[in-house]
Amino acid sequence: MDAIGTFLMFMFERDAPGTQITNVGDSLFWVTAQLLTISSQMSAPLTTGGRIMDVVLMTYAMTVVTALAGSFGAFFFHTRES
């Protein structure tokens, strides 16, 4: 997800005037920060494609975090029940 998001975000944002994503490194940093922090205080994308990617990344990150939390909860519930 990180690699695909990095490529797509770079393609969407690289030519936008005023963007802070000017190279692949910037894109990798931005996408990784979004996935790890579930929406950081970094600047929002400027293009429509970038904004859609931002929503997709946030939704993906929230889904992974909630699935992991649910798995831990189910494990401890099942352990206590036995």
Image: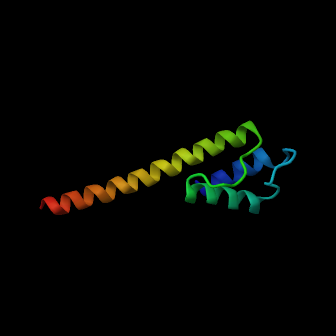
In the image, residue 58 above or below residue 80: above
Q: Is 52 or 1 nearer to us in this picture?
A: 52
Q: Residue at x 33, y 56 (%)?
A: 71
- In the rendered image, which quarter is residue 33 located in? bottom right
Q: Is 5 or 44 nearer to us in this picture?
A: 44
Left or right placement of residue 59 versus residue 65 in this view: right
In the image, residue 8 above or below residue 79: above
Spot the residue most to the top: 48
Spot the residue most to the front: 41
Q: Residue at x 39, y 56 (%)?
A: 68
Residue 18, x across and y down, in percent: 86, 48
Left or right placement of residue 79 versus residue 67 in this view: left
Residue 20, x across and y down, in percent: 80, 54
Quadrant housing the C terminus: bottom left
Residue 34, x across and y down, in percent: 61, 55
Q: How many marks?
A: 0
Q: Residue at x 39, y 51 (%)?
A: 67
Left or right placement of residue 30 versus residue 21 in this view: left
Spot the residue most to the right: 17
Colouring convention used in this rendered image of the protein: rainbow
Residue 41, x across and y down, in percent: 66, 54
